[in-house]
Amino acid sequence: MKNGEIYRGLLLNAEDTMNMTISDVVRTARNGQVTKLPMVYLRGSGVRFIALPDLLRNAPAFKKVASMKAKMEAERGAAGGGGGGGKRKRDN
């Protein structure tokens, strides 16, 4: 979490906004205090990162996301830079 706390448990649900529900949670506070909780709902804006098991590395859903990302990057590169942004002279 962005506040330095660590939550470990079973991910039950995750939303597009990174809001998530976790069960069988072990919470480690910044000072090292460990607390066991049956269920936690985390707000996505407070999440810094999520560590998933290596087993999911080859999951079909992640392969689909990787191919979509590659396609988007290729389209962005093909669109060209251009940029512009400067002022245009007016003809009077």
Image (spheres, helix red, strand yellow):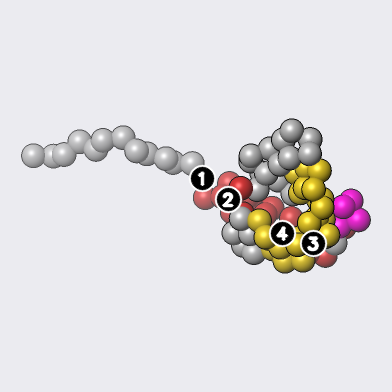
Span highlighted in magenta in the image: 51-56
Mark positioned earlier in the residue sequence (3 or 2): 3
Q: Nearer the viewer, mark 3 or mark 1?
A: 3
> Quarter-wise, where is residue 43 in the image?
bottom right
Q: Is residue 72 something that shows in the picture?
A: no
Question: In the orientation shown, which residue stands out farthest toward the right?
Answer: 55
Q: How far is disc 4 from disc 3 in space, using C-alphas?
A: 7 Å
Quadrant of the snapshot with the C terminus = top left
Residue type at mark 3: give it.
Pro
Q: Which residue, given by chain and number where applicable, does mark 1 sit on? A: 80
Q: Which residue, given by chain and number where applicable, does mark 4 sit on? A: 40
Q: Nearer the viewer, mark 1 or mark 4?
A: 4
Q: Position of residue 86 (x, y in %)?
A: 31, 35
The residue lying toward the viewer, choosing from 18 and 1, is 1
The residue under the point 72% across, 35% down is 30
Residue type at mark 4: give it.
Val
The residue lying toward the viewer, choosing from 35 and 77, is 35
Q: Secondary structure at mark 4?
A: strand
Q: How far is disc 3 from disc 1 in space, using C-alphas?
A: 51 Å
The residue under the point 13% across, 39% down is 91
Magenta stretch contains residue 57:
no
Q: Secondary structure at mark 3?
A: strand
